[in-house]
Amino acid sequence: MNNQNINEENSIIEIKSLTKFYGKFKALDQVDLSFPKGKIIGLLGPNGSGKTTLIKIITGLLKQYQGEILIDGKQIGIDTKKIVSYLPDRNCLPDNWTVEKALTYFKTFFPDFEYDKAKNLISQLGIDLSKKFKEFSKGTKEKLQLSLVLSRNAKIYVFDEPIAGVDPAARDLIFNLILNNYHRDSTIIICTHLISEVEEILDYAIFLNRGKVYLREYVDKIKESSGKSLNEVFKEVYRCAPIN
Ligand code: ADP
Ligand code: MG
């Protein structure tokens, strides 16, 4: 395994010996990770590798696990939920809500939510605030949720599969939304199985496979030492990965 040591001062999330079972199935197996502060981090791996499970633990949605996690030096709880802005891998807002209702909900729920910023962002995208979620396409729903999540003034933004199922134009727009709107000193975690589509915007990559960490390193270093693109390295890692 190729590891970049990140000292604890430079890390925003510290994970030690994290193991998660669903019944008898081990979805995460002794995961040790440091997430570097202020970077754009790819949590990468094929479907079923444990990305969403890890993210749900970090966001406090899954509470039963073994191991230790510190987020900005704190145990997971109310304090850490306040600093993590999370885009789930599926639309979580009720279909019969209007965009205006979603804006009000975010304002009520998250003290760090910048209502005007979100409203401007959504208007710029040409989305009608009085329409209901069910009236929008998958791509538009994705952009809407992304605008809401990005309008929180958070230390950590987590996007779970933000580009799955959207066309290349929507993908570019989504990346531009992320790159132009996050707070510069915060950390971004993008979970995806679409490595070639995200590699140009990532600073740091974590490869997961079957619940284990296979590689964690700065993308520049991976490219420099291998002479290959992240996607090529990814394919090699997974070709060699044992099937257990
Ligand atoms: P990824 O996000 O990388 O696709 P997940 O974390 O969603 O991976 O899933 C990892 C593994 O855990 C998969 O094999 C999946 O089937 C299993 N899994 C996920 N959620 C549950 C659950 N609630 N109950 C049982 N197994 C689950
Ligand atoms: Mg997932």
Image (cartoon, rainbow, N blue to C red):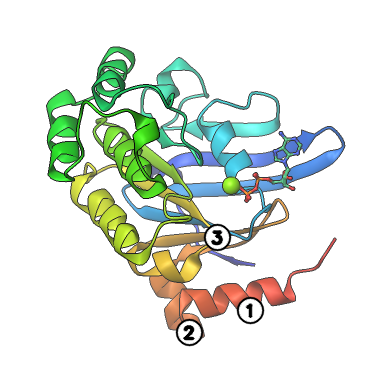
Q: Position of residue 96 (x, y in %)?
A: 40, 22
- Which numbered disc, 3 or 2, marks the residue that appears first in the sequence? 3
Q: Which residue is mark 3?
A: 193
Residue type at mark 2? Lys
Gap in angstroms between the C-alphas marked 3 and 2: 18 Å
Q: Is mark 2 within 8 Å of ligand 1?
A: no
Toward the viewer: 146 or 93? Answer: 93
Q: Residues within 10 Å of mark 3 (few under 14, many from 20)?
A: many
Residue 182: where, in percent of width, then height?
Answer: 24, 44
Q: Which residue is mark 2?
A: 228
Count of marks placed on residues: 3
According to the picture, the residue beneath numbered tag 1 turns out to be 236
For the C terminus, the quadrant is bottom right
State the CA–CA distance, disc 2 to disc 1: 10 Å
Q: What is the secondary structure assignment of the residue under circle 2?
A: loop
Task: Give the left or right position of residue 21, taking residue 176 as reference.
Answer: right
Q: Is residue 91 left or right of residue 149?
A: right
Judged from this view, the residue extending furthest toward the bottom is: 227
Q: Is mark 3 within 8 Å of ligand 1?
A: yes
Q: What residue lies at 46% left-to-right and 53% top-to-bottom? A: 6
Q: Earlier in the sequence, mark 1 or mark 3?
A: 3
Queried on whether the Cβ of the residue with tag 1 lies below 8 angstroms from ligand 1, the answer reads no
At label 1, the amino acid type is Glu
The relative height of residue 109 versus residue 239 in the rendered view (above or below) is: above
Disc 2 and disc 1 in contact, CB within 8 angstroms: yes
Marks 1 and 3 sit apart, C-alpha to C-alpha, by 15 Å
Q: Is residue 120 left or right of residue 148?
A: left
Residue type, mark 3 in image: His
Q: Which of marks 1 and 2 precedes in the sequence?
A: 2
- Of 81 and 106, nearer the camera is 106
